[in-house]
Image: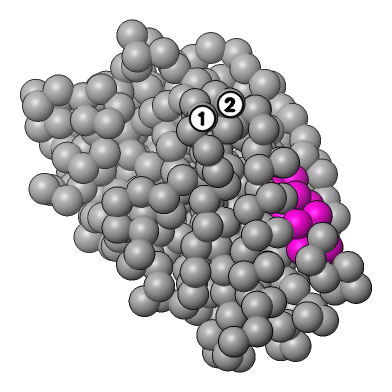
Amino acid sequence: MKKVVIAPQGFKESLSGMQIAEAMSLGVQRVWPDAETVLIPVADGGDGTLQALVDSSGGEVRTANVEDAIGRPITAEWGALGDATTAVIEVASAVGLARLSPDERDVRNASTFGIGQLFTHALDAGFSNFIIGVGGSATNDGGAGMIQAMGGNLTDKNGEELPRGGIALSSLASIDISSMDPRMLHADIVVACDVNNPLCGPRGASAIFGPQKGATFQDVQELDAALANYSEVIAKDLNTDVAEIPGAGASGGLGAGLMGFFGARLRLGADIVLEAVSLEEHLIDADLVIVGEGQFDRSTVFNKSPVAVAQRAKKHGTPVIGIAGSLGAGFREVHQHGIDAVFSLVNRPMSLKAAMEDTKRLVAIATEEACRAVSLKT
């Protein structure tokens, strides 16, 4: 075994992608001490995307003082990539649902204001290209708060500025972006998105994602109507139709805001990350590829990075093994998508807490055993 490409995701609430890759490398070296291990942490646009891109580019994680979804001051992270022109913003870092306790969730009034503040902070630091990971938001305002934070004016029929939040968009009558930060005219924005939901309707932001954020049936109906009005005013004042664009409903309609106001492009998160880390180049002469994530299950086959990596490896006929924290329902479906064998790091009865506290050692052991299986002569 000459060259092993190690390309895992981070394990949520445990270790980063790079830490998992380092543990996997330890396991590989125990079996093949002379093997070249190439560590390429990856992600799919959700959790870990910022860290994976920062690690692979030689960049750094920076912080900014912004407001969370309900207006509280917080410190959020963003990524300054090694090219010194590209910034990575994870929506969840600023206005994420995980930042709120269940009784703090307020999907009617939650705002993306903090995202606009992150944009401004990165622009002030000299960045003009942006990769936006849109998963995990607590908001349903179509990106309206983001626009307000950057100088745009959203007003009702009386010319009064709207309060923050998605429900206020039911009163929106006019959008004026003449005072919005002019630097955004020259910004290039790519949205890492693995959903194709439209902005409104039965598959829209409010109906599909609203309940996850605490929306009641009545909330869903009212928020959907508010976003429909929002899209009509965008079409009237900006001459842009965002209502039916696939992905417009991502992150509570933030996809629509990013496309409608800034001309952002939506791409699969895994594709963005794998291109950024130059995965294809490293796969050309690889003898084995190792992927991983917290759990392999049926959802893994839907645009998740382990399968995205595996499919690229199969273009070169390279075997792929996967290491996961656990194996959930439908995990065997990954075999039809390029992952030849999967191994769980749970090697004895243990609690989730115990497994998460010992992840590095367990990943190394699971990887070692997987590599021993690969090295068997038949």
On the rendered structure, is 51 left or right of 249?
A: right
Q: Which mark is residue 350?
A: 1
On the rendered structure, is 220 left or right of 31?
A: left
Q: Which residue occupies 36% across, 54% down?
A: 297
Question: Residue 54: x, y in percent?
Answer: 75, 51
Residue 281 lies in the magenta-colored region: no
Relative depth, front residue between 348 and 196: 348
Q: Which residue occupies 61% across, 47% down?
A: 10
Residue type, mark 2 in image:
Ala
| Span highlighted in magenta in the image | 18-29
Residue 23 lies in the magenta-colored region: yes
Q: Which mark is residue 354?
A: 2
| Residues at marks 1 and 2, CA–CA distance in whole angstroms | 6 Å
State the colouring used for the structure image: one colour
Say if 333 sits above or below 123 in the image: below
Relative depth, front residue between 127 and 28: 28
Residue 55 in sight from this viewpoint: no
Kindly check if marks 1 and 2 are in contact, taking CB atoms under 8 A apart as contact.
yes
Relative depth, front residue between 359 and 368: 368
